[in-house]
């Protein structure tokens, strides 16, 4: 079984978006994520107030590895993989 997870952050210090409404609730709980719906969006997202490096360290402890990273405007996006 493979998993792909994307994290994004508008700043280097957080908050960090860690999932959408279809994300694994157990993993979201482990990350300490809160589910929210931003005004104007038709979807829910999970976020944490932690900086991305803290989130990435937690995900690494669960077996996730960064496979790519990019910047989109002022947003940073990391894609992770777990087998």
Image (spheres, rainbow, N blue to C red):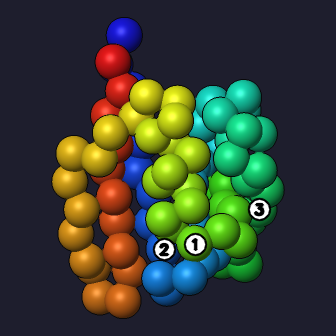
Of circles 1 and 3, the one toward us is 1
Q: Which mark is residue 9?
A: 2
Measure how far apart labels 1 and 2 are at the Cα level: 8 Å
- Determine whether the residue tagged by mark 3 lies in a helix, strand or loop: strand
Residue holding disc 3: 36
Q: Is residue 32 left or right of residue 8?
A: right
- Comparing 55 with 61, the one in front is 61
Q: Are marks 1 and 2 in contact (CB under 8 Å)?
A: yes
Q: Who's the residue at 48% across and 74% down the image? A: 9
Q: Position of residue 66 (x, y in %)?
A: 29, 47
- Determine whether the residue tagged by mark 1 lies in a helix, strand or loop: loop
Q: Position of residue 83 (x, y in %)?
A: 33, 18
Q: Are marks 3 and 2 in contact (CB under 8 Å)?
A: no
Residue holding disc 1: 51
Q: Who's the residue at 36% across and 10% down the image? A: 1
Q: Who's the residue at 47% across and 82% down the image? A: 12
Is the residue marked by circle 1 packed among few (<14), some (14-19), or many (20+) residues within 10 Å? Answer: some
């Amino acid at each position: 079984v493979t998993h792909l997870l994307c994290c994004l952050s508008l700043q280097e210090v957080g908050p960090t978006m860690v999932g959408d409404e279809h994300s694994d609730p157990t993993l979201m709980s482990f990350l300490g994520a809160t589910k929210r719906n931003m005004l104007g969006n038709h979807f829910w997202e999970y976020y944490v107030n932690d900086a991305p490096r803290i989130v990435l360290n937690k995900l690494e402890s669960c077996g996730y590895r960064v496979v790519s990273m990019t910047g989109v405007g002022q947003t940073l996006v990391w894609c992770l993989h777990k087998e």
